[in-house]
Amino acid sequence: MIKGNFCKIAYPIDLFETGSMPQLYSSVAGNIFGMKAINNLRLEDIDFSEKYVKSFKGPQFGVNGVRNFMNIKKRPLTATVPKPKVGMNTNEYCKAAYEIWKGGIDIVKTDENMTSQKFVNFYKTTEKILNVRDRVEKETGERKTFLANVTAETNEMIKRAKFVKKCGGEFVMIDILTAGWAALQTLRNECQDLKLAIHAHRAMHAAFTRNPRHGISMLTVAKCARLTGVDNLHIGTAVGKLVSPIKEVLGLEKEITGEEIEETFLTDKGHILQQEWYKIKPTFPVSSGGLHPGLVPYIINKLGNNIILQAGGGVIGNPLGVQAGATGFRQAIDATIKNISLKEYANTHKELKAALDKWGYIKPV
Ligand code: CAP
Ligand code: MG
C-alpha cells in the first residue's frame, strides 16, 4: 500500500528466521538505507505476526514481576544514577548509593558509560554495592535494588551477569543498542536461568531515531526490545533534557505495556501499526533525562503511576546533599499521588523545598 510519502509492505514469514532479531534488521533495515535511488527513508513501525511474536521470549518479569520483587504495589518506582557519570571510584560510588537508598529511592542505576573502568572495577564495585544494599534494606525495612551495567563483549557480559547473581542482585542493565540485538538475546537467555531482570538503556538511539525524515523510529526499537525480553526500557520524559516529543513518549508507553495496540497509521496520533502481543509481558517504562522534583507532577499526570522515574542530577544536585535529594524526589512523588501541590507540600518538607528553590519547575531547553 502506498499513500503520499508512506508505504506499508507485507513480507511472507518464510523470508525470516523466527527468533532472530539481528536477521530481522538485516532484512528490513539493511542495505535499503544506503540505496542511491532514495534520499530519505524511515522505518516507522513493524507489525509482527502471531508466529513471529511467539518465537521470542519477551520479558521474564515485566511490570508486575518487578513490582512483586520490589514489593511496591501502586506508586511509581524511583531510581537515581549517581553523578558525575564516570570518575567516581568504588568507595565514592558506594557512598553515594548508600545515601540515595537511605533517602528513599528504590533503585540505584549505573550510568550507561560506567562499566568497568580502572577506577570502578565491575566485580569489586558490584560486590561492595550489593553489601551496602543489604545494609540499607535492614536499616530501612524497604526493598532496594541495583542496576548493574554489564555491557561488554558478550562472553564477558555473561560472566558479569553471573557475578551479579552470585552477589545477590536482581537486575542487570545493558545498553541494548551499543551491545547489539544478538548480545541482548544471549543475555536474555542467560537471565532466564539466572532469574535476573533486565534494565535496557537506549544510548545511541538518537543517532538514527531523531531525524523525522530518515532512520528508524524509537517505536520500532522499543517493540523489538519488548519482544526480545527487556523488563525496563527508557522511553523519554517529554519535558527533560533530551529530545522526546510527548506524542512519541505516550506511544512508546502504550506499545510496551499494552496487550493489543490499535492502528493509528497515517493519523496525527503517530504512525503506529496494530499489534497483538499475545502472552508477551509488558515492559516497565522508564522516564529519565534531566528530571528534578518540579517536573514530577507533569510526568505522572501524563504517564500515570506505572512508570519508573529516574533523576540523577535532579537528586544529587540538591543543595542539602545527596540523601536529602533522594528524599526530596520521593516527596514530589508522594505529593503528586496525594494530589497536593508541590508548593504546599514543600511548606512542611524541607528537602522538596530546597529542590524547588533551586530548580523550580524549569523544563530544560
Ligand atoms: C539521565 C541519564 C540517562 C538518560 C538517557 C543521563 O541522567 O542517566 O542516561 O536519561 O536518556 O546520563 O543523561 P539525569 P533516555 O537524570 O542526570 O539527567 O532516558 O532518554 O534514554
Ligand atoms: Mg545516563
Image (tube, helix red, strand yellow):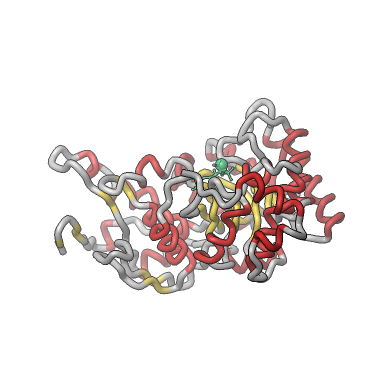
- Relative vertical location of residue 89 with respect to residue 46 in this rendering, above or below: above
Determine the residue positioned at 61% across, 56% down: 197
Q: Nearer the viewer, residue 331 or 212?
A: 331
Q: Quadrant of ligand 2?
A: top right
* Percent of width and height locating residue 188: 54, 53
Q: Nearer the viewer, residue 215 or 187?
A: 215
* Percent of width and height locating residue 253: 47, 63
* Percent of width and height locating residue 300: 56, 64
Q: Is residue 179 visible?
A: yes
* Percent of width and height locating residue 148: 65, 45
Q: Is residue 222 left or right of residue 91?
A: left
Q: Is residue 311 left or right of residue 364?
A: right
Locate residue 259: give its quadrant: bottom left
- Relative vertical location of residue 73 with respect to residue 79 in this rendering, above or below: below
Locate residue 40: give its quadrant: top left
- Relative vertical location of residue 310 with respect to residue 96 in this rendering, above or below: below
Extreme residue toward the right, this view: 139
